[in-house]
Image (cartoon, rainbow, N blue to C red):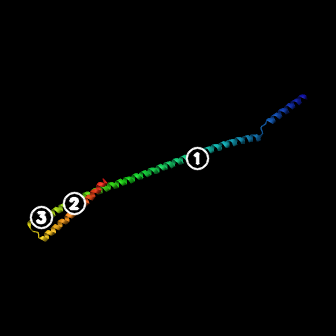
Amino acid sequence: MKLKLLILAVCLFSLQITLAQEILPDSIKVKTVETVQKNDLEKIKTEEQLNKEKLKAEKTRVKELKKAEKEKNKAIKAQKKAEKELKKLQKAEAKKIKAKKNVEKSKSKIAKHNRDLDKTKNKFESLKSKGKLTDKDELKWREKILKKEKKSIELQKNLETAQKKHNKLN
């Protein structure tokens, strides 16, 4: 009987020890909840860090887009300025050509008028030498010649002004 009691005591003692060491389901839940919370915190931190990086990348992209837009605007302004300068040069070239044409036109008018004046003078001289002119006719011829000489002087002045404009543009 002593032996039975001893065995019974040892069995109860070992049963007590095993029950005392048994992990309670609540402590398992607490540990899993803690690990889940840690995992959630890590996920949240990772997501926040990713969001920060995305925001930073978006800001740099926006800055680059603004910079590209500014450069595009500068290029457009430079192109417009170049076009404006080209138009200005084309207008100046057109003015030069027009001034040159005016000079040539004036010269041809003067030449034509001088030929006409010479013909008129020659005709007057031939009629005068033949004696076919009366005093009245001679006066009309001289007035005609004088009028043509005045016109020639006026054309010469026009030529001078056209040449001045042409020289000024060159």
Viewer-proximal residue, 108 or 159? 159
Task: Look at the image and tell me in which quarter the N terminus lies.
Answer: top right
Q: Amino acid at mark 1?
A: Leu
- In the orientation shown, which residue stands out farthest toward the bottom? 136
**Left or right for 13, reference 142:** right
**What SS does tag 2 mark?**
helix
Mark 1 vs mark 3, CA separation in Å: 104 Å
Query: Label 1 to label 2, Cα distance in Å?
Result: 82 Å
Q: Residue at x 27, y 58 (%)?
A: 162
Mark 1 touches mark 3? (CB < 8 Å):
no
Say which of marks 1 and 2 sits in front.
2
Of badges 1 and 3, nearer the viewer stands 3
Find disc 3 in the rendering and name its residue.
125
Label 3 Cα crowd, 10 Å radius (few <14 / some 14-19 / many 20+): some
- Distance of mark 2 from mark 3, alpha carbons? 22 Å
Percent position of residue 33, x then y: 72, 42
Earlier residue among tags 1 and 3 = 1
Kindly identify the residue that appears in the image at 70 percent across and 43 percent down.
37
Determine contact: label 2, label 3, CB under 8 Å. no
SS type, badge 1: helix
Q: Position of residue 25 (x, y in %)?
A: 77, 40
Q: Nearer the viewer, residue 158 or 17?
A: 158
Q: Amino acid at mark 2?
A: Ile
Q: Quadrant of residue 46?
A: top right
Mark number displayed over residue 110: 2
Q: Quadrant of residue 24?
A: top right
Residue 129: percent from the left, percent from the top? 9, 65
Residue 101 in sight in this render: no
Mark 1 or mark 2, earlier in chain: 1
Q: Which mark is residue 55?
A: 1
Q: Amino acid at mark 3?
A: Glu
